[in-house]
Amino acid sequence: MFRSKKKKAGSRKRREVEAESEKAESDLQVLEELRRSRSRPSKSAMTFSSRSTSTSGLLSFDDGERQTKQKKRKMRPNLVVSSTVDVEMEEPIGQYSTEMLASLRSEQSVLLSSKKEETPEDTRHSKNRVTFGEHADGFGISKTTEVVEDVATEEEDDEQNRRWEEELMRRGGHRIPSTSESKGRRSRDGLPAYPMRRNVACVSLGTVLGKLEKSLESTTFEDERVSRELSRLEAEAALIETTLKQQQEELLVSSEEFDYFQEIEDFVKGLSFCLREKAPVIKAKEKCIVDERVQRVKTTQQEEKRGIEEDIMSFLNSGVLQQSDVFGLKHLDLLSSGEAVAPLNDALRAARVLKYQQHFTESYVAGPQQKDEDLFADAIDEINSLERVYGRFQEWKAKFPETYKSTYCELAQEKVFAPYVQTELLHWDPLAMADTDTKLKSLKDFAWFRVLSQHRLGSDEAVDGPLLYQVRDVLFEKVCAAVSSYFDPYSSLQARSLSLVLEEINRHGYYTLVEEKLHTLANTALESFSSEAKRTVLVAMDHNNQDASLFSRYQLERFNTLQDNLLTLFVNLPKGALAAAGFRCLLQVFHQLLAYVRYCEDTHKTQLVVTATQVVRQLSGSSYLLQVLSEPSQECELKHIMELFSPFLQHAAQ
């Protein structure tokens, strides 16, 4: 059975230190005796030089490479001096004192002079040994006890030795280097490190200069890089600052825009509620006014027609006229019922004779001028007039044009402004515009037209937007409704008023923009002229009955007025399809007149031919109508109809 003996290193080292301290004191005494016996030290004396290469047991701190390569031996704190050499030490000036030297000696680990001087006990303690059987020099260890010796590694021994040295130096009053400093100054074996060739950074001046140049280049490059980075950061900072200012401005604008549109929202809501309430009222009043005008015109026309029928029946019943003397009698349809017509009383007959004596006069009388009703008087100031409402929308357009455009305000304003325009046009009669008492003779006389014409951007947009809508869908719609409801072809006032409206439309360049509605209006008016010409009743006479002559002349004057009114409208129609339609209507009326004069010639009753051809004679002596005609075919047709009238014109001249 293997057994190993071990002794704890701590207790062993304490005993060794005590023993070595005693030996050091004895050695110190020996050195003192030697110093007194000799006057100068021998060459073999103990020194602290690291240059000594002697193999004797002198004290040495040499940490050369040769010693580091050798196997490290166990350091013991005893001082061994060769017995063969008499050592004599003399204390020189500036060296350590005797006591300090003794303490240093006692604190150093010195190699033994030779292996022979090692005691068996030390050798035994420095080895890991396993004994077999009985051991003579035992320390009272039981034979059956297995002793395990802890062998300290070299690193642990070095660390312990370093601590001992620091403790002893501290007790001696010497400065102890810091741990980091001592670690940096010591090599791996614990001895002080000194610069070696392999640790030298540069071996020549050129290398030093090269490294300095490289360092300068790298430093310059880094400086340039940092400068560029700084410039980039400054540019980014400036951009961020600019962006921040821009965002602050945008935030301010957005705040103002939000507050402004809060007010716009309230304004539009109030305006919408107001217009929703006023629109039915405006339409009801407008319908009432139009119905009154229609009733007045129809009453006049019916009275005129009834008077003609009664007078003709009276002349036929009295024998003054024969049925063959009446041209167009079939259109009256008087004899179909077979009822007798009551004779006229004296008062009514006298009134009609007076009317016939004064010749044919205006059949339509404009209504009395009425003060415009302010239907928005009960509204707040912001919405009680078109000018204020339009100004508010223009303010919006000036401040926020993009929002104004994106919300299609132009389209909304068309409907928004319409009630205000309708209110102003409520009592305006388009078929009495030429009346001398009428103040509204031009579009510029309307307040709504002046307001909506203030902010025209250019010639291309002169008739665009809300203004066009009011002209086309409000004003012109009112004119079309009047023509279709109560237009009288025998009224010179209505014909001149309608021509004046067409002139205003043409003057402001609205012909092409209202072309569709203009076609409807013109066709309605021309149809009225054509139908009335066909239903006209004329009388052919060759005797001098006063009442019959007055009645016949009155009918011819009425028909001539129809021709004049048609010519007035024709010359104001725009060239093209409308002018061609007007010319065809004019030819129909002329053919109706030509049929009458031919009928007079066939019946040899030409007494009223001169009166009947009065308008044609004026046209034949003037080239104005030829200048109005736009197509050569129309000129040929006009010349042809004039040639047909030429025999009757010559007869009238005779």
Image (cartoon, grey):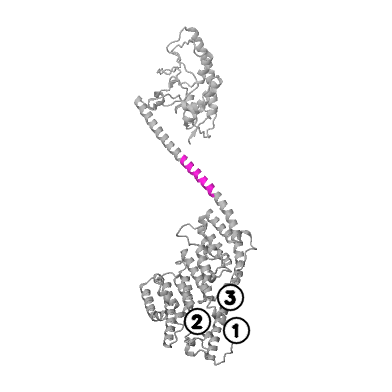
At horizontal 51% and vertical 55% (from top left) the residue drawn is: 401
264 is within the stretch colored magenta: no
The residue labelled by disc 2 is: 553
Q: Can residue 32 be seen in this view?
A: yes
Q: Give the quadrant of the C terminus.
A: bottom left
Magenta residue span: 234-250
Residue that carries the numbered disc 3 in the rendered image: 291
Q: How far apart are marks 1 and 2 (CA)?
A: 19 Å
Give the farthest residue toward the right. Answer: 378
Please tell me whether residue 277 is drawn above or below residue 216 in the rendered image: below
Residue 204 visible (yes or no): no
For the residue labelled by badge 2, is the local secondary structure a helix, a strand or a loop?
Answer: helix
Tell whether position 239 is magenta: yes
Residue type indicated by callout 1: Leu
Q: In this view, does 436 lie to the left or right of 604?
A: right
| Residue type of the residue flagged with mark 2 | Arg
Q: Does dot 1 land on a helix, a strand or a loop?
A: helix
Q: Give coordinates of residue 80: x percent, y percent.
A: 47, 18
**Residue 348: which numbered mark, if any?**
1
> Closer to the N terminus: mark 1 or mark 2?
1
Report, in whole angstroms, how far the alpha carbon at label 2 lies from the one at label 3.
33 Å
Please say if 158 is above or below 391.
above
Mark 3 crowd level (few <14, some 14–19, many ≥20, 10 Å Cα): some
